[in-house]
Amino acid sequence: MQLFLQQIVEGVASGAIYASLALALVLIYRATRVVNFAQGEMATLSVYIAWQINQWGVPFWLSLGIVAALSFVMGALTFRLMIRPVLGASDHTMVVICIGFFVGFEAICLWFWGADPRAFPRIFPDYAWTVGGVRLTANNLGILVTLCTLTAALSALFRFTRLGLAMRASAAEREKSPLVGIPVETMLMFGWGLAATVGFVAAVLIAPSLFLSPPMMVSVVIYALAAATLGGWDSPAGAIVGGLVVGVAESLCATFVGFIGNELKVGVPFALMAVILLARPQGLFGTTAVIRV
Amino acid sequence: MREVGTEQVLRGAGALIIALALLLVPLVFPNFLVYQFSLVLTYAIVILGLNLLMGFNGQISVAHGVFFAIGGYTTAIFITRYGMNYLATLPFAAAMSALLGFVVGVPALRWQGLPLAFITFGLAVLVPPVALKLEPITKGATGISMPKPTAPAWFPGNQDTFIYFLCLVGVALCVLIAWRLTRGDTGRSLRATRDNGLIAESLGVNLTKVRLAAFTTSAGFAGFGGGLFAIVNAYVSPESFQMTKSFDFLVGAIVGGITSISGAFVGALFIVFLPDWSADMNIALSGLIYGGVMVAMMLVARDGVVGLLGTLSRALIARLSAARESRSFKTDDRPAGRQFQT
């Protein structure tokens, strides 16, 4: 029972990280109907830059702040230069472009920093409490708190600010929004930038335990894809729930299902994704798309 | 109708040149390169399958490395474990992959578009861990090595040349099948399903059957290519079937042009020789070029190199004939599906 609870705690912690990356994916999908397979790779590049700046002597927290802003610019530029020209093209085209980003961003990391994994400092202190035999680490709690803060900040942005309203409008009605004076393309660019920053946060949270290496986020992207699919692609709340479910399921399966173990645990999100796509393609919290014939 | 006639002549000439060039490879190049060209042929088969699926039928797959791996392992296991003749294993390699293609293809009927991309992406990531996990069968990280086929006495070349010609026969077979499939009624229903499923269905095309058949056949091609790869390489391991392999095939298909048969060869040449050439400078360079090429191709030339050549030659023919008829007004010589996007 203790092991079971412990695994749930661990699962929630890693699930929170998947949830934040899934949140980034959903942000982009809602705005531009693009599923950015390369979100994780872009985030890896950001983390590398943060690491580098830190190595140059800039204080750790300051370097995180700088790179959060840089990630925003990177996401916005990626959209402006490479997605905007083909906006509205087929899924097919978008998938190929995003796989191109995936390969390209990973290659950039490899180019500058090589394949050797590097240690990335933990943000949260090494501290742990034991509650009823279950170990709670400050790191796990910190990750959860970060996710909650991130979610609250994003929902507040979308719910209470004019900017958020304009972003929602641009995502919902790309053709009609300009009529009421919303600069749609700027909003979409903003959406991509925001997603890149959220992805960066996810990568910073996971980098200490995975070690910083160019393919660090490859499997995390699968978890995030599964989380977003589970929650429904147009639902940020769904992405969070989906992320937590995927995290817990992974952790439990890896521990209690002998065949899966540590090597095959990347199969868990895959299986979840396949099941949900068959049973409820729009996801738990998603809305069904209405197709006009 | 003169344009069409000229175009067909051009196309025929192109195919003939490629065929001749492929035949001349062992005479011109040293042994090591002949091995590389054999790899080109095996990859070309996989890309051909991918083109059938993506280009002609409009279904996305970023997981052809998976089917390739199934084919490779099938051949390797049948040769080493059951002592089968290497040629006899190839139909099994194709069949095993086609079977998996069918298994993925059935739910894929519901997953057209993005979901299919997620699922195939997930499959691509899953291959190496599964191959490691199934150690009793796949020998895990050690991999399976097998003897290369030896050239029979009547064959006038060495072993590598012999293997090259084996691959050439395999490719010829696949090109014939692909050529047959993309023409006539079959080709029309494939393309109609891609362009507008609803209209295709109302015209009597059985979408389920066409999509499933396309997925199965495409996977079969990839498995056949994988089997040949195992024979050429004489060794398979999870290392040969990393996720990046799936992306390589995708890059190859995109570069060559996903709606062409000859594009498969252009793409295969690209993915075999570019990494070799660029690794001397920087190991990251090929990835950078792959990524750049995928994005750039989508932005400027969605029909790949072959599509680009086609557009150029059509424009040239149009200009020539226009000059001849001293009539400069041409209505529409853009290929279909390249409308201006806002």
Image (cartoon, coloured by chain):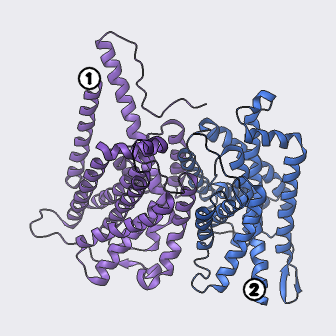
Chain painted in purple in the figure: B
Q: Relative to residue A202, is residue B174 drawn left or right?
A: left
Q: Residue at x 88, y 89 (%)?
A: A132
Q: Residue sitting at 37 percent across and 45 percent down?
A: B189
From the image, which quarter does the N terminus of chain B lie in? top left
Tag 2 secondary structure = helix
User: In the rendered image of this protein, does residue A184 appear above or below residue A200?
Assistant: above
> What chain is the blue one?
A
Label 2 resides on the chain identified as A
Question: In which image quadrant can residue A61 be found?
Answer: bottom right
Which quarter of the figure has residue B327? Answer: top left
Q: Nearer the viewer, residue B72 or B268?
A: B72
Residue A78 place in picture, x, y as percent: 67, 44
Which x, y percent locates residue A176? Answer: 74, 31
Same-subunit check for callouts 2 and 1 = no
Q: Quadrant of residue A141?
A: bottom right
**Residue A253 shows up from this direction:** yes
Which of these two is toward me, A10 or A207?
A10
Q: Estimate the x, y position of residue A87 in percent, counting from the top left.
A: 62, 38
Q: Which mark is residue A31?
A: none
**Residue named by callout 1:** B2
Give residue A4's mark. 2
The residue that appears at 54% across and 56% down in the rendered structure is B111
Q: Is residue A178 left or right of residue B282?
A: right
